[in-house]
Image (cartoon, rainbow, N blue to C red):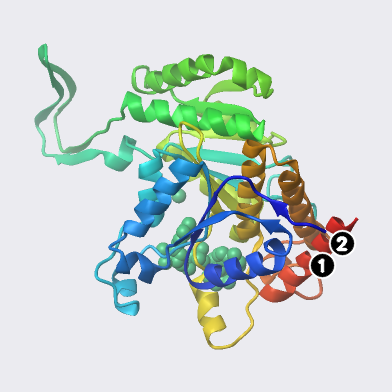
């Protein structure tokens, strides 16, 4: 069998600890035997970031902008403990934060579903993808305690002068919070959500509370609607239906919904509901994450971290049972997208077959420890990290030789 060849560059971003070990195994066991990935490699190992004063992270982000598709392994975000552990010059910024800022992108979290792990919510049959507008609102707010009696005002100073409105006349003590957002950031967010909904051909929801915050949330709603109108032809062609919902209505509906929806949330709602949906679907090892820029550049990764506790076991020479599904799906997502953009259908078929090999194994009872407690029926034993990947490799070989 001749190898599939990707036409254009796929940007590979390597990472840390247990996920770095798994990353290598995925390439050797599942990818390199069958597909020439035309990779451009960026090593974001925490030491490599330190040695380059984090320039490597900036280079990797720019490579995604240039080539359009990347795949990223989980990386350490250094804190004081990591600075000592790896003898770093300083606690470098979160690589995901740096890449997201350069791409001006939005993160979408999407679970991988298997039929023997029932979601906590019985109606959920298809993935629910959450988008969080990770800018502004209470995360960049200014807040203060008020010692009453006091008058608190909202003052805007612009080219026309000073405009003030009274927020509250305090008789006693209290609290105040001022938050903001920008049209530019909301618009980029809306564009990224639309790009991803089209890419996934999935229903798109945007929720806010514009009945109460008529100007603030109303502005979010209006910008979203304008962008949807702007992309109407593309959305229609992909069969994507858009709905604006009040946040409370969205929450009520999602609990009875079959899934298969991309739910775009404001910052706080996205923070809260992404954790609710992730918990509802089961294991972190099954949660993928995609970063999408407003002009349609894609970076695929696992939503979990570097699984440090397992890495410590691995270093002692002990076998681990680390779930590789989200990392494998990061690769298949990127390969499918590259194939789609370049018109290489064999690459898209390969991604489908690799994903099917993963799902069929789990559905036949071959799974890592984290899933054993969630599966119904509960399998008698679990497999270790390498055994799972070997079982996937065997299934994949069967599928590709047919
Ligand atoms: P973590 O790597 O997500 O792991 C936390 C725990 O969740 C693990 O100890 C394990 O539980 C379970 N888990 C996560 N992924 C799993 C998998 N694939 N298979 C099986 N179990 C899994 O979080 P962390 O240990 O708090 O963080 C480690 C490092 O990751 C940190 O340096 C952090 O900065 C970084 N991080 C990176 C990203 C990213 O690059 N996207 C995201 C988050 C965190 P048990 O121990 O109970 O088995
Ligand atoms: Mg949260």
The residue that disc 2 covers is: 398
Q: Which residue is more in the foreground, 278 or 102?
A: 102
Q: Position of residue 56 (x, y in %)?
A: 36, 58
Q: Position of residue 73 (x, y in %)?
A: 52, 60
Residue placed at 11% from the left, 39% from the top? 147
Query: Can you say which quadrant of the picture contains the N terminus?
Result: bottom right
Residue placed at 52% from the left, 77% from the top? 311
Q: Position of residue 380 (x, y in %)?
A: 81, 74
Q: Position of residue 3 (x, y in %)?
A: 74, 56
Rounded to the nearest angstrom, the CA distance separating label 1 from label 2 is 6 Å
Please indicate, yes or no, whether residue 212 appears anywhere in the rendered image. Answer: no
**On the rendered structure, is 140 left or right of 35?**
left
Q: Residues within 10 Å of mark 2 (few under 14, many from 20)?
A: few
Residue placed at 69% from the left, 75% from the top? 386
**On the rendered structure, is 23 left or right of 355?**
left
Above or below: residue 228 compared with residue 115: above
**On the rendered structure, is 2 left or right of 273?**
right
Q: Residues within 10 Å of mark 1 (few under 14, many from 20)?
A: some
Please indicate, yes or no, whether residue 328 appears anywhere in the rendered image. Answer: yes
Q: Which residue is more in the foreground, 388 or 249?
A: 388
The residue that disc 1 covers is: 394
Q: Which mark is residue 284?
A: none
């Amino acid at each position: 069998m001749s190898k599939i060849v990707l036409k254009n560059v796929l940007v590979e971003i390597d990472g840390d600890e247990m996920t770095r070990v798994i990353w290598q195994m995925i390439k050797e066991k599942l990818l390199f035997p069958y597909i020439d990935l035309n990779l451009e490699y960026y090593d974001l190992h925490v030491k490599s970031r330190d040695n380059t004063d984090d320039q490597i992270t900036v280079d990797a982000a720019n490579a995604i902008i240039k080539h359009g598709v990347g795949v990223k392994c989980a990386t350490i975000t250094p804190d004081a403990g990591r600075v000592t552990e790896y003898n770093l010059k300083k606690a470098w910024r979160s690589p995901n934060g740096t890449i997201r800022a350069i791409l001006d992108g939005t993160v979408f979290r999407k679970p991988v579903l298997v039929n023997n792990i029932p979601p906590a919510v019985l109606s959920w049959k298809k993935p629910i993808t959450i988008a969080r507008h990770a800018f502004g609102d209470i995360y960049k707010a200014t807040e203060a305690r008020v010692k009453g009696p006091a008058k608190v005002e909202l003052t805007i100073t612009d080219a026309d002068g000073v405009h003030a409105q009274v927020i509250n006349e305090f008789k006693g003590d209290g609290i105040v919070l001022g938050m903001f957002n920008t049209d530019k950031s909301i618009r980029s967010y809306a564009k990224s959500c639309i790009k991803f909904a089209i890419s996934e051909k999935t229903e798109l929801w945007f929720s806010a509370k514009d009945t109460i915050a008529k100007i603030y949330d109303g502005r979010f709603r209006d910008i979203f609607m304008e962008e949807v109108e702007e992309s109407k032809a593309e959305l229609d062609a992909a069969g994507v239906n858009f709905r604006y919902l009040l946040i409370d209505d969205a929450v009520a509906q999602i609990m009875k919904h079959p899934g298969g929806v991309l739910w775009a949330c404001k910052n706080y709602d996205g923070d809260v509901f992404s954790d609710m949906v992730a918990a509802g679907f089961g294991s972190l090892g099954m949660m993928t994450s995609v970063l999408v820029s407003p002009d349609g550049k894609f970076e695929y990764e696992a939503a979990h971290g570097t699984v440090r506790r397992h890495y410590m076991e691995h270093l002692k020479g002990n076998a681990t049972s680390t779930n590789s599904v989200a990392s494998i799906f990061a690769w298949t997502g990127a390969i499918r997208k590259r194939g789609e953009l370049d018109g290489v259908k064999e690459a898209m078929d390969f991604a489908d077959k690799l994903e099917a090999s993963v799902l069929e194994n789990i559905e036949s009872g071959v799974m890592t420890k984290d899933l054993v407690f969630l599966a119904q029926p509960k399998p008698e034993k679990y497999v270790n990290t390498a055994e799972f990947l070997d079982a996937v490799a065997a299934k994949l070989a069967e599928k590709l030789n047919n």
